[in-house]
């Protein structure tokens, strides 16, 4: 149902908590595969991916071609892109499943979503409203918040470009009105 693609570069330390957060999704059957798309790390990133049962591939260079090449190796109808160090908080699986079901039942539903930041999720009220408005109006950089996207939409926009800001560029290609906020948060570690 869902392939997760994790971008890495010298990420042995940050990859572990990211993959740990995905384990419940794999056990439930939501996550069918995890592909670690690496830039040619010299640390133990490959070993971490191997121990976790992930497919590991090296695509040296910019992140855009790395993510696009990894996506081409998957076959599921949904893709989730994230960087090592992004940790989805509890509840991410239900939020992802709900989003994918809504997209399947309504032609008008968005086909792409990003995680809320942990601070936005933790402080409801005015901050939540501001975060939602910022996302809807295209303000703020959402590229570090992961991306859940229907494969059909990803293919239709041509995937990640080779641009230096590939993650932000793919969000611009999708269009701000077609990117929703998931009902779950994620936090980043460095």
Image (tube, rainbow, N blue to C red):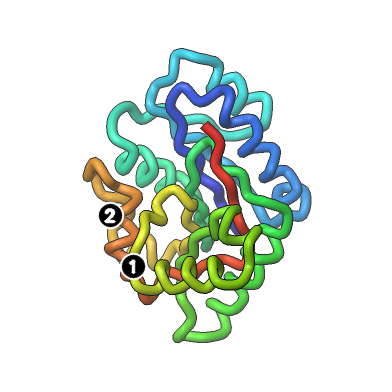
Per the rendering, the mark at residue 138 is 1
Which mark sits nearer the N-terminus, 1 or 2? 1
Q: Quadrant of the N terminus?
A: bottom right
Residue 22 image-quadrant placement: top right
Residue 83 picture location, percent across and down? 48, 40
Residue in the image at 48% along x and 66% along y: 131
The residue at the point 46 percent across, 75 percent down is 110
Within-10-Å neighbours for mark 1: few <14, some 14–19, many 20+: some
Which of labels 1 and 2 is toward the front? Answer: 1
Identify the residue at image location x=52%, y=36%: 84
The residue sitting at the top extreme is 42
- Give coordinates of residue 92: x percent, y percent: 66, 58
Callout 2: SS: helix
User: Is residue 120 rendered to the left or right of residue 26?
Assistant: left
The image quadrant that residue 19 belongs to is top right
Kindly report the distance in space between the C-alpha atoms of the residues bearing marks 1 and 2.
12 Å
Horizontally, residue 184 falls left or right of residue 27, namely: left
């Amino acid at each position: 149902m869902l392939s997760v693609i994790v971008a890495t570069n010298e990420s042995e330390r940050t990859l572990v908590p990211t993959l740990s957060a995905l384990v419940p999704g794999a056990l439930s059957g939501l996550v069918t595969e995890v592909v670690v798309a690496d830039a040619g790390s010299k640390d133990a990133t490959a070993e971490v991916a191997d121990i976790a049962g992930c497919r590991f591939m090296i695509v040296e260079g910019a992140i855009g071609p790395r993510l696009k090449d990894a996506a081409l190796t998957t076959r599921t109808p949904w893709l989730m892109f994230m960087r090592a160090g992004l940790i989805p908080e509890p509840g991410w699986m239900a939020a992802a499943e709900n989003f994918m079901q809504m997209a399947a039942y309504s032609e008008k539903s968005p086909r792409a979503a990003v995680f809320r930041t942990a601070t936005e999720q933790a402080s409801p009220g005015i901050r939540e409203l501001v975060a939602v408005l910022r996302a809807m109006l295209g303000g703020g950089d959402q590229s570090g918040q992961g991306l859940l996207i229907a494969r059909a939409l990803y293919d239709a926009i041509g995937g990640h470009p080779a641009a230096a800001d590939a993650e932000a560029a793919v969000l611009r290609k999708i269009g701000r009105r077609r990117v929703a906020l998931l009902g779950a948060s994620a936090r980043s570690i460095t």
